[in-house]
Amino acid sequence: MGKVLDGYLKELKLPAIREWYEDMSKEAERENSSYEEYLLALVEKEREERNIRKREKMLKDSRLPMEKSLKTFDIKRVPLKVRAQVDILVDGSFCDRKENVLAFGNPGSGKTHLLCAVGHELINRGRKVLFKSCNFLVQELLKAKQELKLARVLKKLSKYEALIIDDIGYVQQNREEMEVLFALIADRYERSSIMLTSNLPFSGWESIFKDPMTTAAAIDRLVHHSIILELNIPSYRLECAKKG
């Protein structure tokens, strides 16, 4: 009977129940548990392990740097206002409201680490996140446009509740690159969240989008529903170098 049950559980793709039903059966017998209690414990075990596997897959797909989590982020370095904002962000409700998260600050101030840390917390809550450097993302979009696949790629990106774009403006785009970046921002407007980091204040964004009208339109779409994190603090890397 055990082999038949194992076969059925394998066919039904219930690996946790298959692994645990014998041990938990003995435990249920010792504790004089009812059939319903035993069955509930087994189903909860399957659900728990399935959620773990799902989060592991989501984390791998997200391309988030594994080391950039809240545990490794020195939250005491950032202003109190930002700490309060982070406490709100980690619950993920901003994704439901389709809000953007815009992190500004000097190089080395922890912008990327902080947004990645929030990304990890979102995944822990079952939300799909994708991390991309701006330069890499723009080249990917440009290639898709040249191959007449831009709409398909934008649709694929729309499946992520939060798209983290790192270092917007760090590499200056030409006009074609600017156009696909704007297309992405416009496509996600009021549909899903963008999280981005930038060393440039909005006043310098014309160097990214090349003309005042497009710059204003991009900023308007990003800021309309947004949470802005201002990390006006010294470079963490520089501080570490000085201590070393």
Image: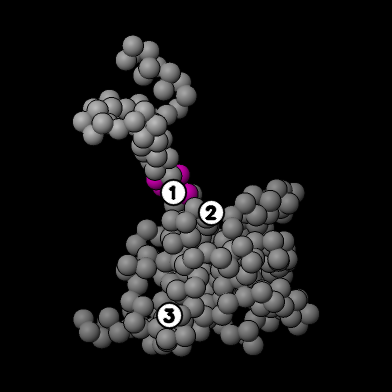
Residue at figure coordinates x 52%, y 55% from the top left: 127
Q: Please tell me which of labels 1 and 2 falls first in the chain.
A: 1
**118 or 29: nearer the eye?**
29
Tag 1: residue type? Arg
Are the residues tagged 3 and 1 within 8 Å (C-beta)?
no
Horizontal and vertical percent position of residue 201? 58, 85
Alpha carbons under labels 1 and 2: distance apart? 9 Å
- CA gap, disc 3 to disc 1? 25 Å
* Label 3 Cα neighbours within 10 Å, binned few <14 / some 14-19 / many ≥20: some
The image shows residue 89 at horizontal and vertical percentages of 50, 70
Residue 11, position in %: x, y?
46, 21
**How many other residues sit within 10 Å of disc 1, few (<14), some (14-19) or many (≥20)?**
some
Q: Give me the residue at 64% from left, 66% from top.
A: 97
Mark 1 secondary-structure assignment: helix
Depicted 18 relative to depicted 132: above or below: above
Q: Position of residue 124 (x, y in %)?
A: 43, 56
103 part of magenta stretch? no
Q: Quadrant of the N terminus?
A: top left
Does 74 sit left or right of 116 as displayed?
A: left
Q: Which mark is residue 83?
A: 3
Q: Which residue is mark 1?
A: 55
Residue that appears at 43% across and 80% down: 83
Mark closest to the chain's N terminus, 2 or 3: 3
Is residue 57 on the magenta stretch? yes
Report if residue 192 is visible in the image.
yes
Mark 2 neighbour density, 10 Å: few (under 14) some (14–19) many (20 or more) = many
Q: Is residue 225 above or below residue 231?
A: above
Instruction: Specify start and end residues of the magenta stretch as a single range.
Output: 52-58
Real-space CA distance between mark 2 and mark 3, rounded to the nearest whole angstrom? 23 Å
- Determine the secondary structure under disc 3: helix
Residue placed under numbered mark 2 in the picture: 128
Q: Do callouts 1 and 2 mark residues in contact (Cβ within 8 Å)?
A: no
